[in-house]
Every structure is written in structure tokens, then in C-alpha cells.
Amino acid sequence: MLDKGTVIIMLFQNIKNNFFAIPLLFSFFFSSTILSRIEYNVTLENVTMINENVMEFEINIRSAKKGFNLTSYQCSLLLTDNIANGGHLTFYYVEGTSQITNLPNYADEIFYINDEYNLIFASWVGSDVISEDRLIIGRFRLQNTVHFSKIIPKFKWNFKGSIPTILTGESFKDITIPGNFYYSYNQEFDRMLIKSSAHINIPSEFKLLQNYPNPFNPTTKIMFDLPEDSHVNLAVYNLLGQEIKIVINDVIDAGTHSVNFSSEGLTSGMYFCKLKVDNKFVEIIKMILLR
């Protein structure tokens, strides 16, 4: 008969090749522990249209009272099928956007079940202390092979089925409280998704606006104006002129756009943000990071 330690090792080995084994591992631990009630908040917010085929959103976490240890997590989000507009969706974590050590880059998958898309991401086993300061679990990109429908996406946290949303604390205790998960809707998203002259004003010239806040820590918002649909390259450089990160490299629709830039892994100092639009326009701003 296999002992408990052998079973755990087998489950971990199985997870490497089978995403659906994650709930099995969680269930194993939870069956032998007492549920703990830890006050926290997890939010889905900052939904942004990069262009009509690409949207991004951010998942954040914070403690509502005192700090706690987060050992692993799995998030499951439901999205109705009419947003896809008949296209094929892909979903993944945007590298370098997380502020925790246990990254959400394991098994970022999308499944179509009961007329809904189920977006799923999870971490491996780790250890992060979550305090009252908001931390970004990660920014995620949802990409479509055609334009998204001209409707507002209604994300829903999923706590049912074989792959639900679940968080574990000390000793892998289940600390999941469905009421502590939120979708923070941004009214400005209407304007960004529905692109017509009746809803937005098209800028008259190309422009890279000063980031805000500036100085910043840990994130800042970068905005730019496009008078016409254009191929945009938006990148950040250090004082030596070395490229730190390509924020955008894609065709973007005319309008005013904004993206969030995370300073994860960077030291205090001055950085440069460069906007290059086709062969028509180049502009650079200075950004100051203060730790």
C-alpha cells in the first residue's frame, strides 16, 4: 500500500503532464485539513483593448486584514461565446507582469464548455506573503483571430466543475472565499471596445503622452494618440539605450490608447519610453522609477 508521501510525489509528477491533475492534488490536501477563513480580495480589472483583436486584463490580490502565506492558486474565469464573434481565441500570461514569485505561467488554457469560454491559469507550488498592499498576480492577453464582438465582455469567476478557482494557504489549506473575488468593470472600456465616430473622438495627430504617475512604483500608465490605424512599436529603454521591454508591437486602431507598464525586476532610475509608428512618427518620453 502506498504511503502518503509516495502519493504526493506521484501526483506532482502527474501534474507536469496533465493540467487536470491539479484539482486532484488540491482535493488530496483539502480532505485532510480544516478550512481556514483568511480575509483577502482578488480582482479582475484594468481590461484594455490593445486593438479589435486583442484585449488584456489584470488579476490582483491583497490581504484585507493581516498578511498570509499563499502557497498555490488556480483561477478559472467564464466568458460568454458571443464575444468571440466566430473567431478562435487564445489566452496566455504576459511575461514579466507579475509581482509575486510564484508565477501564473502554468497551464494557461482556454476551454469551450456549455456555450462559455473557460479561461484557466495556475501556479506551481510556491510561497508568497500577501500583505495589504495590492500585488499583481499577472496581466493576461486574450487574442482573437477576428475582431471581437462590439459588446462588453462579462467575466465571471468560476468556482464549480472539475477546474474551479481555488487558493491555498499554509499547509495547502483551502482558503478560497468566492465572495472575495471581484470583476472591477471600467466604464471607459465601452469607449475602447466600440470603435466608431459616434463613440470616440479620433485624435488629429500622433502623440506620446507623459506616463502617469511619474515618478512611479510599481506600475505606470502610458498613453498615446493615433489619428489613423497604424503599426505601433512601444518600447522601454534604460539609460544605456538597451531595450528593457517591448510593450506593444502590433497594428492598433485609430484613437487614444493606454497600457500599463510594470517595473518588476527594474532598479530605481530613469528610463525612456519610445513610440514608433510605421515610418511616420517617433517620440520619446522620460520615466522615473522610485523604489
Image (cartoon, helix red, strand yellow):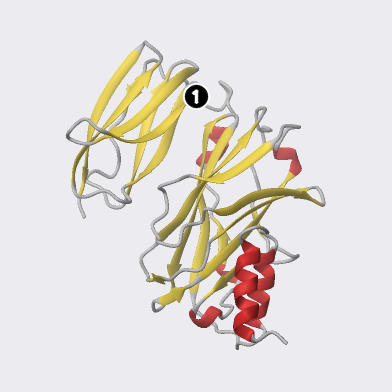
Instruction: Report the front residue among 256 and 233.
Output: 233
Task: Give the position of the C terminus as an image quadrant.
Answer: bottom left
Q: Seen from this angle, which residue lies furthest top?
A: 280
Q: Which picture quadrant has residue 210?
A: top left
Q: Give how far across and how far down residue 166 sits, in percent.
A: 61, 69
Q: Is residue 46 left or right of residue 22?
A: left
Within-10-Å neighbours for mark 1: few <14, some 14–19, many 20+? many
Image quarter of the N terminus: bottom right
Kindly indicate the quadrant of the structure image that contains residue 221.
top left
Question: What's the residue at 44%, 16% (across, down)?
Answer: 227
Q: Say what amino acid the circle numbered 1 marks.
A: Ile
Q: Which residue is mark 1?
A: 252
Residue 261 x %, y %:
36, 42
The answer to whether any part of residue 256 appears in the image is: yes
For numbered disc 1, what is the local secondary structure? strand
Seen in the picture, residue 221 relative to 275 is either above or below; the reply is below
- Left or right of 242 in this view: 77: right
Q: Is residue 178 visible?
A: no
